[in-house]
Image: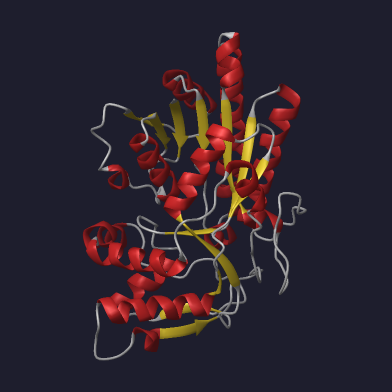
């Protein structure tokens, strides 16, 4: 199958590209190479004859159409997005431009390309939009998000992804584009940009810097290993029912503070010092509008497609810690040139950190 993956130099996108090529697919990676993209994530496949790269920005409709036409894909996996909630608090318009307008442009380009295909190829074409559980808002102490949960986004990031989801749905209903949507829980694993919680903890710890934990650390997330997510996305693309939504979760709920402590314990084992890394934990002012709890009911994808997560959190976190310890040159270049783990999205009520 010929795939067009948007955002393929990013964290999840690169995992999808690597896995797709390992399974025999031909992949064109469309990426604008924004701050969180890293071509080094694809070093293992960049010389593979089945891998192609196009640098283009989804905010430019002409460039997007040209990229889709050049790739001539059998299917599109749309992962390109601005993703960090804290950054969306500081610069919401950027998230609207990329996540909403960019998705609309890609849908337009996909529709135009598909309409020119022969009937048989047109019937086989698919468009998979990769979204987030954050579109559903916040849960209380109990309950799970399902595919029928109402959308109640609480951050500019979540709102931009919810808007993109609705656009994808509408292109399916109005224009007959064969679309699928996935909503995933929090991802972690190798190659994640250091602004996210897991690499933030690991890199702060090994640099001897305070490990920031928002509020009291009692916010709960469901953690999904990135390779499990990539496997789920390819399963949905190949076997999912068009027009459907599939929730993808890791079945690994944890309070943020418990995740942080577990990472510190793994670091104590892997790179011991004279004190525990947990001594560096520092509670800071909470994120504005911080959702209390996310949890996914992934029963539908299990029942229909036979997918469930294979990586338990202890193994996944251990693998992730080892990867960051073994790949200092990967993250040191980022910290030196693009991002030094400064606090973002503090909002007007939070003291500078």
Chosen colour scheme: secondary structure
Q: Is residue 63 above or below residue 344?
A: above
> For this rendering, which residue is in front, 183 or 344?
183
Q: Is residue 70 left or right of residue 245?
A: left
Picture quarter with the N terminus: top left
**Residue that lies at the very extreme toward the top in this rendered image:** 118
Place of residue 162 in the rendered image (x, y in percent of width and height, measured from the top left): 68, 48
Q: Is residue 207 visible?
A: no
Picture quarter containing residue 52? top left
Place of residue 246 in the rendered image (x, y in percent of width and height, measured from the top left): 64, 45
Q: Is residue 63 visible?
A: yes
Q: How many marks?
A: 0
Place of residue 87 in the rendered image (x, y in percent of width and height, measured from the top left): 52, 59
Place of residue 181 in the rendered image (x, y in percent of width and height, measured from the top left): 63, 40
Q: Is residue 271 above or below residue 167?
A: below
Instruction: Identify the residue at horizontal 39%, vertical 85% (top origin).
Output: 278
> For this rendering, which residue is in front, 82 or 146?
146
Q: Is residue 323 left or right of residue 234?
A: left
Instruction: Identify the residue at horizontal 50%, vertical 23% (top origin).
Output: 74
Instruction: Identify the residue at horizontal 59%, vertical 79% (top origin).
Output: 218
Instruction: Identify the residue at horizontal 60%, vertical 29% (top origin).
Output: 107
Q: Is residue 2 left or right of residue 325?
A: right
């Amino acid at each position: 199958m010929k795939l067009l993956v948007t955002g393929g130099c990013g964290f999840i996108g690169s995992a999808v590209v690597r896995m797709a090529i390992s399974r025999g697919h031909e992949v064109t990676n469309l990426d604008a190479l924004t701050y969180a993209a890293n071509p080094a994530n694809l070093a293992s496949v960049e010389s593979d004859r089945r891998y192609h790269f196009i640098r283009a920005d989804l905010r430019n409709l002409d460039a997007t159409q040209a990229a889709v036409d050049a790739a001539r894909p059998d299917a599109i996996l749309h992962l390109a997005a601005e993703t960090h909630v804290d950054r969306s608090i500081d610069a919401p318009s950027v998230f609207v431009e990329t996540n909403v307008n960019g998705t609309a442009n890609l849908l337009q380009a996909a529709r135009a390309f598909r309409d020119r295909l022969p009937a048989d190829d047109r019937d086989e074409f698919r468009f998979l939009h990769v979204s987030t559980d954050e579109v559903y808002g916040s849960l209380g102490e109990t309950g799970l998000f399902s595919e029928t949960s109402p959308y109640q986004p609480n951050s500019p990031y979540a709102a931009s992804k919810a808007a993109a989801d609705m656009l994808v749905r509408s292109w399916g209903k109005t224009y007959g584009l064969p679309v699928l949507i996935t909503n995933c829980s929090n991802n972690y694993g190798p190659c994640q940009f250091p602004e996210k919680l897991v690499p933030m903890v690991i890199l702060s710890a090994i640099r001897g810097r305070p490990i920031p934990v928002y509020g009291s650390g009692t916010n709960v997330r469901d953690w999904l290993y990135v390779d499990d997510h990539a496997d789920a996305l390819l399963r949905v693309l190949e076997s999912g029912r068009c027009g459907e939504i599939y929730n993808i979760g890791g079945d690994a709920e944890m309070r943020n503070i418990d995740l942080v402590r577990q990472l510190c314990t793994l670091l104590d084992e892997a790179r011991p010092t004279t004190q525990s890394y947990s001594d560096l934990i520092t509670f800071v002012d909470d994120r504005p509008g911080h959702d209390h709890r996310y949890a996914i009911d992934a029963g539908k994808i299990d029942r229909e497609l036979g997918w469930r997560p294979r990586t338990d959190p202890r193994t996944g976190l251990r693998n992730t810690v080892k990867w960051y310890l073994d790949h200092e040159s990967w993250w040191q270049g980022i910290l030196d040139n693009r991002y030094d783990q400064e606090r973002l999205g503090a909002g007007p009520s939070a003291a500078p950190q």
